[in-house]
Structures are given as structure tokens and as C-alpha cells.
Amino acid sequence: MCCNDQPPVEEPKVSIDWSRILVSRDEFFKLIAVASAAFIGMVVALPSIGFAFQYFLVPRRQDWIKVGKLETYEVGKTVDVVFTDTTGTPWDGVCAKRSAWLRRVDENNFEAFAVNCTHLGCPVRWEAGASLFLCPCHGGVYYGDGKVAGGPPPRPLHQYPTRIANGHVEIKVGPVLAEG
Ligand code: FES
């Protein structure tokens, strides 16, 4: 002791038991395999969880969307209308562009059908001469009211609600889920 009366501080002795920390090569590969399986499982499961969350837990909006002025539609005619679906997500971009088959049934009533075939989603076209919707992909045929007339489609075309508001024709869009 020279300058003060404090005894020198002794460093605590730490002994590491490396045999308890290090893993054997087999255990290491097992850990890698389990971590890889967990990662792949997570990557596979995330989109399904996202889909379930979007369609079953988060209610999607339904909006009335203008598709044109009333006087532009002729009674008895079925025409293709294009609109932007505002009920999706902000990053839908061009995918928000949709079209529908719109028919003016009489002065005050319209019918609108989704263009997508209920088999695998190909766009159907209206054959005015035959009064049928035809699907070019696998020969699906629908009557003018959207009911299945033949081919593989499992159910009628999706029908949008329609209304006339302030001189415009509007259709109600929202999530199109499987209809029984
Ligand atoms: S997609 Fe229309 S019949 Fe298959």
C-alpha cells in the first residue's frame, strides 16, 4: 500500500464451461434444419394469413360508382362499362380498373353483371344475336339473366346492384366472394 489505505480490487474469476455452450456438429445441423423449416413455414403461411385477414376479418367497403349518364343507355341494350373500383386498397393501381355488362331493362331499371366467368375468371362477352354471354376459355354459356346455360361454370355471373341517382346510373361494387 502506497498512496491510500484501500486494498487492491481483485478481478472476479470467471470460468466458462465451453462444453455447455458449444453444440456438437449433429446438434448444429439439427438447429439449422429446424430454423429453416420454421422460416419456410412462415413464408408459406403468411400469404394465407393475409388473405384470411383481408377477406374474413377486415370488412371491405361497398361503394356506389357512377358508370354514365342515364340518357346514354338505350332500353334493351347490353353494353360494356368500365369503372374504377374504389373499394380496394390504395396500391391497387390499374388492377382497380373493372368492367361490367350493363343492360337497360326499361326506363328506370338496369341490370349489371361481372364480366368474369365463374369457372376460372375469363372475361365473358355478350352475344346480342343469341342473347347469351359466352366464355371463350372453356365454352361456358350464360343466359341473359346471368344464369348458367351450359359448360363448366359452377354458378351464375355475379350481379351488381344498380340504381339511378341524380341522372346517373350507378352500380354497387365491393368484394366478390363465391356465391352459392
Ligand atoms: S373460364 Fe369460363 S368456362 Fe372456363
Image (cartoon, rainbow, N blue to C red):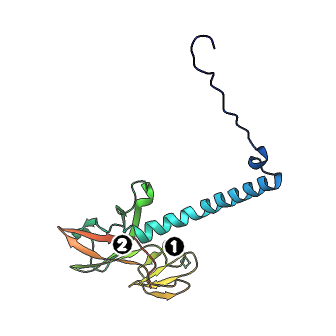
Kindly state the secondary structure of the residue where label 2 is placed. Answer: strand
Q: Quadrant of the N terminus?
A: top right
Determine the image quadrant of residue 101: bottom left
Query: Which three-letter amino acid code belongs to the residue tagged 1?
Result: Gly
Kindly state the secondary structure of the residue where label 1 is placed. Answer: loop
40 or 119, nearer to the observer: 40
* Rendered residue at 36%/72% (across/down): 79
Name the residue beneath numbered marker 2: 79
Q: Quadrant of the C terminus?
A: bottom left
Question: Could you tell which of marks 2 and 1 lies nearer the N-terminus?
Answer: 2
Determine the image quadrant of residue 18: top right
For mark 1, does the 10 Å Cα neighbourhood hold few (<14), some (14 to 19), or many (20 or more) residues?
few
Ligand 1 is located in which of the four quadrants?
A: bottom right
- In the picture shown, does residue 14 fall above or below 156? above
* Rendered residue at 50%/83% (across/down): 141
- Furthest residue to the left? 166
Query: Which three-letter amino acid code belongs to the residue tagged 2?
Result: Val
Determine the image quadrant of residue 82: bottom left
Name the residue beneath numbered marker 1: 121
- Number of marks: 2
Closest to the camera, between mark 2 and mark 1, is 1
Alpha carbons under labels 2 and 1: distance apart: 19 Å
- Furthest residue to the top? 3
* Rendered residue at 56%/14% (across/down): 4
* Rendered residue at 74%/58% (across/down): 33
At which x and y percent is residue 45?
58, 64
Q: Is residue 98 left or right of residue 30?
A: left
* Ligand 1 within 8 Å, label 1 CB: yes
At which x and y percent is residue 78?
35, 76
